[in-house]
Image (spheres, rainbow, N blue to C red):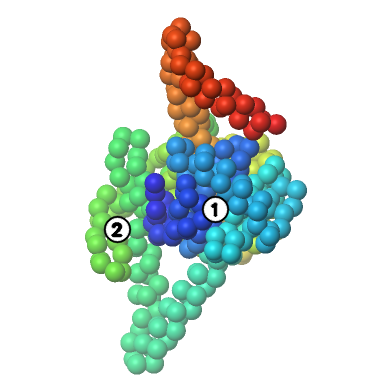
Amino acid sequence: MFKACIFCQRSLGDNEVVENFPIGRRLAFDQERGRLWVICDRCRRWNLSPLEERWEAIEECERRFRDSTRRFSTDNIGLARLSEGLELVRIGRPQRREFAAWRYGKQFLKRRIRTLVAMGAKIAAATGMAAAGVYAFGPLFAQGEERIIARIKSDDGRKLRVTLKDAKKAKLVRAPDRADGWMLEVRYKLEERDWGILGRYGKGKSQTEELEGPTAIRAAGLMLPKVNAFGGSNTQVRDAVTMIEEARGPELLFRVAAANPGEQAPGFFFPVDATRIVRRDATVRLALEMAAHEETERRAFEGELALLEEAWREAEEIAAIADRLLIPESVENWIRRQKERLQLADR
């Protein structure tokens, strides 16, 4: 059972409420689709729980949600705050925009506040040092640019270390000769240096890698939260969802958003290079971030379905053998009870 956020690596905390899943202070669950997430308190990202750990926990979350007196719901999503401090988010049949507002709204708002606070602290520190006769504006703000924000595993197994400065130079380019019709051009460093509490920083000259398919989408999902440091408003979230819907899917959005080399996009004063993601409109960047997360999760869920199919085939073989054997009465009674339980659950 994982205990740290897979995105920011911070502890997810624990709870003493859900006996079958004592991890996290905020759980989201979808009983119909069999999904259970732990929402990170720090970065607000949703961590999909391992397949084998979620089924009984989802049933327990449903019971706790129904028994709670402190809850409110729409037709699609409900929130319950338990007296023990645990929050449960119940997903019904949400409209995509409503679900996106719940999932990303607070995450983007908290990200914006955290960025503004960090910038304010740097400005205050630099101002104080300037008053003492030390110029520090440039070094303080440049320091964070060289910090590693993502480690991407390439298709051939190499580890690509991407700094914030490199992430801001990532390009989403149309590539008719590629299978998906687009590619992600990423700058990276092969080495890094550890500066202790200050973090890890890139070392050496930046190189360029062209990524495509699932690898490119995973890379975008890791880099875009740092590129979109100021998050977005609920209006921007809704507009971003509209873009995903019009593109007819998260993966197809990358093809639609990819630009031709040399293509220009509107800027504040002058046109800018449209292939550079950081130069695109904030709504486009948010849509790409959301699409990357949804597509990565979809592929993970497809992998779980493959595991389920394999488990079903093994169970079917065992059942075929068992049908030809003399089964004790106690076992037959147990099988009958399980079938009745499943039939009641389907109702």
Percent of width and height locating residue 259:
56, 43
| In the image: residue 207, left or right of residue 48 | left
State the image quarter where residue 201 is shown: bottom left
Whether pointer 1 and pointer 2 mark residues with C-beta atoms closer than 8 Å, the reply is: no
Residue at the (68%, 44%) spot, across then down: 92
Q: Amino acid at mark 2?
A: Gly
Percent of width and height locating residue 277:
52, 52
Checking the image for residue 159, the label placed there is none
State the image quarter where residue 254 is shown: top right
Q: Which is more toward the observer, 166 or 253? A: 253
Q: Which is more toward the observer, 20 or 217? A: 20
Residue 54 visible to the viewer = yes
Residue at the (55%, 70%) spot, across then down: 113
Mark 1 falls on what kind of element?
strand
Percent of width and height locating residue 57:
52, 45
Residue 75 vs 295, above or below: the answer is below
Which mark is nearer the camera, 1 or 2? 1
Checking the image for residue 27, the label placed there is 1
Residue 41 vs 129, above or below: the answer is above
| In the image: residue 100, left or right of residue 1 | right
- The numbered mark, 1 or 2, whose residue comes first in the sequence reads 1
Mark 2 falls on what kind of element?
strand
Q: Amino acid at mark 1?
A: Leu
Percent of width and height locating residue 322:
45, 12
Q: CA distance from mark 1 to mark 2?
A: 35 Å
Residue 254 visible to the viewer = no
Which quarter of the image is occupied by the C terminus?
top right
Residue at the (35%, 35%) spot, across then down: 155
Outermost right residue: 75
Checking the image for residue 202, the label placed there is 2
